Image (cartoon, helix red, strand yellow):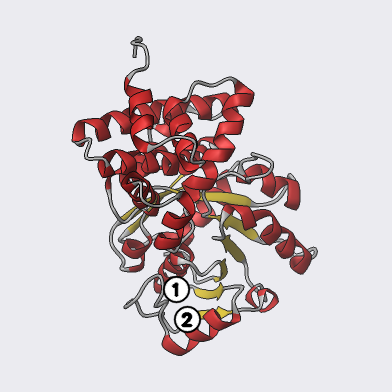
């Protein structure tokens, strides 16, 4: 492991808490910020995140708090793990509190900025400046497995090689491997698009379409992911790696994925999108990302048929069976 650091993790949902837990177990001093005072008090008192990660004890060197100013006090590194729609406002708040102080800033948030359709690294450079030390962390991970210390591999991507390595070193231990690379576009597209495909496979499995259909959706979903990444300037190799294929396979095939569960719920056809989200009780990033990707695809003239059907489903314009029929009756073409 690297020398112990003082780190702020912003966002105390399942993923933020899991990453904070890992960093604390590695030996760093971690401030875990939540915007809800009640949650901060509960985390301090019970020493576990009973809502998202019940039964996993928070180490003594993990400090829950509701004051962002206190959370950023004397930290060297900041890891942002808030929903994509809160990403910009969180960075603006960080900038105002840090003033002229320079920190290493990374995020494990997946998705696009909903209103502008921008990738999150574009938002980061816009808010923090082109010279900011920023990194995106992504890959095939479930929060509860990271929290329990099960073997995990992720990607640390930055336009500055030393920044990518900095975050890789912070996370490194016997059970956690962080690979470095520089294609922030590909990493972020992979992290956002796989959630849309997980909704699609959840719908397929919910309708009892079988393993063949699931494999076809994953394969063709990867092609769509690659098309979007290339159109935005990403590299093909990235989509073939952990942040693309790895994350896609994990999210599309395991019921721990809330996006897959969301699709499964839609397939039951007895609840609308909002009702299924409320039943899951956590943010379903794919349901937000699909609206953004639809706008991007229209703007760029991209053919993304699976995404298109998920978009129509989430916006309640068609039924799950109509979505399947639309995909299966497309005209034949070369792969």
> Disc 1, disc 2: CB below 8 Å?
yes
Q: Residue at x 47, y 81 (%)?
A: 61
As drawn, the label of residue 61 is 2
Q: Residue at x 38, y 24 (%)?
A: 326
Asked whether residue 225 is in view, the answer is no
Across and down, in percent, residue 73 comes to 67, 76
Nearer to me, 96 or 249: 249
Secondary structure under the numbered disc 2 in the rendered image: loop
Q: Residues within 10 Å of mark 1 (few under 14, many from 20)?
A: many
* 109 to 75, vertically: above or below: above
Quarter of the figure with the C terminus: top left
Q: Is residue 115 left or right of residue 282?
A: right
Q: Is residue 121 left or right of residue 311?
A: right
Secondary structure under the numbered disc 1 in the rendered image: helix
* 135 to 295, vertically: above or below: below
Across and down, in percent, residue 303 comes to 49, 21
Q: Is residue 172 left or right of residue 96?
A: left
Q: Of the two numbered discs 1 and 2 on the same chain, state the one appearing first in sequence.
A: 1
Disc 1 from disc 2: Cα separation: 6 Å
* 130 to 278, vertically: above or below: above
Q: Residue at x 32, y 29 (%)?
A: 219
Across and down, in percent, residue 143 comes to 38, 61
Residue at the extreme bottom of the image, as rendered: 45
Nearer to me, 239 or 201: 201
């Amino acid at each position: 492991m690297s020398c112990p650091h003082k780190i702020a993790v912003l966002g105390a949902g399942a993923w933020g808490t899991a990453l904070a837990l890992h960093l604390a177990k590695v030996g760093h001093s971690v401030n875990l910020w939540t915007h809800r005072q009640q949650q901060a008090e509960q985390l301090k008192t019970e020493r576990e995140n009973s809502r998202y990660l019940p039964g996993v004890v928070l180490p003594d060197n993990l400090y829950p708090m509701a004051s962002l100013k206190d959370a950023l006090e004397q930290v060297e590194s900041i890891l942002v793990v808030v929903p994509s729609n809160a990403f910009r406002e969180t960075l603006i708040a960080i900038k105002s509190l840090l003033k002229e102080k320079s920190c290493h800033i990374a995020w494990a948030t997946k998705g696009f900025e909903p209103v502008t359709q921008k990738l999150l690294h574009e938002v980061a450079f816009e808010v923090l400046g082109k010279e900011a030390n920023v990194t995106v962390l992504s890959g095939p991970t479930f929060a509860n497995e990271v929290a329990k210390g099960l073997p995990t591999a992720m990607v640390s991507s930055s336009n500055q090689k030393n920044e990518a390595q900095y975050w890789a070193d912070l996370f490194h231990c016997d059970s956690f491997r962080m690979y470095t690379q520089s294609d922030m576009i590909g990493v972020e597209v992979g992290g956002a698009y796989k959630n849309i495909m997980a909704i699609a496979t959840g719908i397929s499995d919910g309708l009892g379409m079988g393993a063949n259909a699931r494999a076809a959706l994953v394969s063709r979903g990867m092609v769509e992911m690659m098309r979007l990444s290339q159109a935005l300037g990403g590299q093909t190799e990235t989509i073939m790696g952990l942040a693309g294929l790895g994350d896609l396979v994990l999210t599309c095939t395991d019921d721990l994925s809330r996006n897959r569960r969301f699709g499964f719920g839609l397939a039951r056809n007895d609840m609308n999108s909002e009702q299924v989200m409320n039943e899951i009780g956590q943010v379903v990033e794919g349901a937000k990302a699909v609206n953004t990707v639809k706008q991007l695809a229209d703007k760029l003239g991209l053919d993304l048929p699976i995404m298109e059907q998920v978009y129509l489903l989430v916006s309640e314009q068609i039924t799950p069976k109509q979505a399947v029929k639309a995909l299966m009756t497309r005209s034949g073409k070369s792969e």
